[in-house]
Amino acid sequence: MRTGARWLAMAAAVLTAALALQTGVARAESNGGVRVMPLGDSITDGAQVPGGYRIGLWQRFVANAFRVDLVGSQFNGPSSLGDHDHEGHPGWRIDQIDANIVGWLQTSTPHTVLLHIGTNDVLQNFNVGTAPNRLSTLVDHITSTAPTAEVFVAQITPLANSTQESAVRTFNSAIPGIVQSKVNAGKHVHLVDMHSPLTTADLTDGIHPTAGGYDKMASTWFNALRSVPGSIGGQGTANLLTNGNVESGTSGWSVFGAGAIATSTSVVHSGAASLQRTGRTAAWNGPSQSLTSRLTNGKSYTTNVWMRTQSGAPTGKVTLMLTANGTTSFVTLAQGAVSSSAWTLLTGTTTVSWSGTLSSATFYVETTSGTDSFFVDDASMQ
Ligand SMILES: [Ca+2]
Ligand SMILES: [Ca+2]
């Protein structure tokens, strides 16, 4: 479904925006989640660190089971950013964003807007004294075009140059009053202090944050979003597995038994990579994850694992090995025939319980017999 939706979106883009595609711009990804527009300049685009704060923000959405669809006409960032859409325009000032905002909002129809703008007004010394007025007008255009949207307005990040930083502080000091006036008028506008969390030590070139600085921004946006119910939808059930979609290398996965794990980019179920398990010498040898501190005794869990063999057609199996008070037990979470010709979803819902103190819990994917090499992708237990 996700791949299909993406293809539909891309096909639509081909039909309606051929020119944009020729210049290598328009691509859109959607998971059907709450539409959030990251809006601003190069700090939203992620200058110096492509993807910028959106990487850490996306990872917080995933880790906390919020389904968010980032939106905008721009597209960039690494594979660890699961949705590359945004509305960050390097070098742009408030007035330039304002000249385009109505069209962007009509195209992307966001439920939530993350606005971080004004840095280029300061850098270009562009009528800085009236920058707050321009910001106020921009916010009005956002709320009049998207009256039900939740609009988060940031006090902008620091600059290393002391004169420019002084202008930033003056600009930022006007923003709480602007936001309050919108709130008083019944608008869904929220203030976010993006200045205090960062220092000039978090800047890579005196202007743009380092990876660590961008992650501070991500944390600040995330906390602000969580404080406004509905701005990023309801929280689902978190996946107990780390990197279940194998889009962050082999992170989170271990070799259980003999052999090796690696990422494969040639046989994938979704995204750019799957997990390849080779060199097995016993049927129980698998890729594994430790869930010792993540399970709740007596809780029902649903497991989904996509599996495919390199060759051979064994029975694939997802197993949880539990050790409590010195006793080890094996729980079958999901099981089914798999082959090399197509991906198979192993799925099941199982109540997991133990007696005493749980000292070890290992999630692993195996076969009921044989040692065929296999691939795993889009694994979840929640
Ligand atoms: Ca998207
Ligand atoms: Ca994948």
Image (cartoon, rainbow, N blue to C red):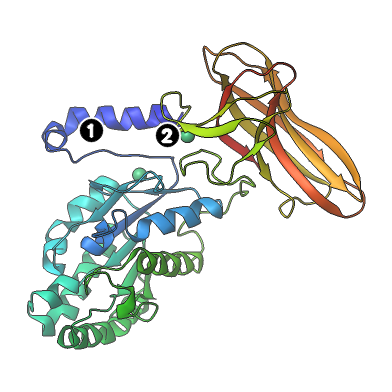
Q: As shown in the figure, which amino acid type bears the numbered disc 1?
A: Ala
Q: Going by the image, does 19 lie left or right of 289?
A: left
Image quadrant of residue 178? Answer: bottom left
In the image, residue 371 above or below residue 90: above
| Amino acid type shown at disc 2 | Gly
For mark 2, give the secondary structure: loop
- From the Cβ of disc 2, is ligand 2 less than 8 Å away? yes
Residue that carries the numbered disc 1 in the rendered image: 13
In this orientation, does residue 112 appear?
no
Q: Which residue is mark 2?
A: 271
Residue 375 percent coordinates (x, y) = 55, 26
**Horizontal and vertical percent position of residue 273:** 44, 33
Residue 133 location (% of width, % of height): 17, 79
**Nearest to N terminus: mark 2 or mark 1:** 1
Q: Residue 182 or 207: which is nearer the viewer?
A: 207
Nearer to the camera, 176 or 344: 344
Residue 321 in view: yes
Distance from Cα at disc 2 to Cα at disc 1: 20 Å
